[in-house]
Image: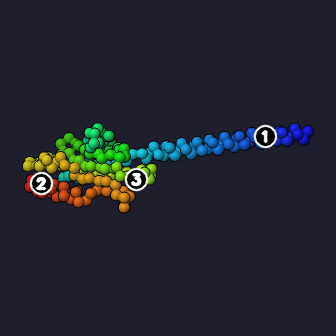
Amino acid sequence: MLNFLCSMNLAFRNRILRSSVSRRVRLLFAVLMVHLATQAQYSKLYVYGYMSDYDSDSRIMTYQVQAQDTIDGTVAASVLSNDTGGYEMELPYDGVFRMNFTADGYVPKTFIIDDRSVPAKARREGMGMMIVVTLFRPFEGMDTVLAELPIGICRYNKWSGVIKWDAAYSKGIQEKWKRTRLKQH
């Protein structure tokens, strides 16, 4: 009789162990799936913002934003403005993108985003940047070559841990635009 109880206890114990292992495996699987979902969630650079009119400072409600890969020319992302006049898109890492902002009746603007040097840890944690673009209407005597140049270039800054604008480049282009605009008046 004692042998029978011991063997029952062993069988019961084994069933509990198997059940416990099964729970551990399920828990480990769930944690792994959450981890993978988190990785997938932050595998791209999140870019968002809105556009406004230079002269009136009012929001432009209808426009397009397109991110073009500067190496192979493919379109990485393209969006139209949403109901509130905003936009949002995701860009893959390891690229240099020409961001084209266009709206009917306005001079288009272009920016360059270089996200190649964003480290793995920052990619896992997720990165985003807001870009607010101000467009103006074409004017007589406008330098059309100047309109084709990127108004700004940004890239990852390892010291600050964020994607930052190249201030020297932006200042030079903005000064050229100011001189061009002053000639108009």
Amino acid residing under circle 1: Phe
Residue 40, percent from left and from top? 45, 43
Distance CA(mark 1)–CA(mark 3): 51 Å
Residue 117, percent from left and from top? 35, 52
Relative vertical location of residue 171 with respect to residue 42 in this rendering, above or below: below
Amino acid residing under circle 2: Thr
Please name whichever residue, 51 or 39, is drawn nearer the observer in this view of the structure.
39
Q: Is mark 3 on a helix, strand or loop?
A: loop
Residue 119 is tagged as 3
Q: How crowded is mark 1: few (under 14 residues within 10 Å), some or many (20 or more)?
A: few
Residue 107, percent from left and from top? 18, 46
Q: Which one is closest to the eye, mark 1 or mark 2? A: 1
Q: Dot 2 corresponds to which residue? A: 180
User: Looking at the image, which residue is at 27% across and 49% down?
Assistant: 112
Distance CA(mark 1)–CA(mark 2): 86 Å
Residue 12 is tagged as 1
